[in-house]
Image (cartoon, grey):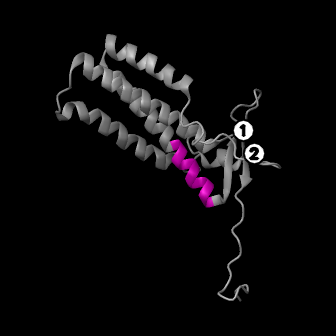
Amino acid sequence: MVRYVHFELRAAIGAAAALAVTAVVLCAVRGLPELSGTWLLPFAAVTVVVALWAGVRSSRLKVVGRARTYEAAVPLENPPAGGDTLRRRPFSPKAFAGFLAVALTLSLFWDPVVTLVLWWMALDWLSDGLVAARWERRNGVLLWRSDSRDEPWQLAYSPVSPRPPTRTATGAPPG
């Protein structure tokens, strides 16, 4: 099992890394783009739209809200020990290679505006991870993505270990 937040962030990191490599190759092959507002405006617009959409996604709306999906997660009896963390594997090499191959090919042979799609994907996955992390923090649980081939998107949750009780200076419990 893998933490759902780590799964989303790993995808965002892979897309952002592919975007960075594509941008460097495009600058080397085609030269630096003009620093006019026409080049930066679409990236700023996508950023604003994704930020606004993240607010809608964190809601309980039926079709677009993620809260209902997270609340439908099943409890785990034995939470995974550690799981697949971002420290161990910060991004998926296969996803990075796929993003890079498609984006680099299309942006070199067709139009550099294809990088806007990678920008949108990276921000979208990042916002998904942030929405899930906020929900986890509010509910005191960790969301896990299932490894089952039958239901690959099934979510489960495990409680975060409880905080130790507050103690006074003498070591006695408060109250």
Left or right, 102 with reference to 63: left
Q: Main secondary structure of the magenta part?
A: helix
Residue receiving disc 1: 1
Nearest the eye: 47 or 167: 167
The quadrant holding residue 161 is bottom right
Q: Is residue 143 visible?
A: yes
Find residue 109 and report its horizontal and vertical position in percent.
Answer: 33, 10
Residue 132 falls inside the magenta stretch: yes
Left or right, 95 with reference to 100: right
Q: Give the residue furthest to the right.
A: 77
Q: Is residue 110 visible?
A: no
Nearest the eye: 13 or 38: 13
Find residue 145 and report its horizontal and vertical position in percent.
Answer: 68, 39
The quadrant holding residue 163 is bottom right
Residue receiving disc 2: 80
Q: Looking at the image, is 137 positioned above or below residue 103?
A: below
Magenta part of the chain: 128-138
Name the secondary structure under disc 1. Answer: loop
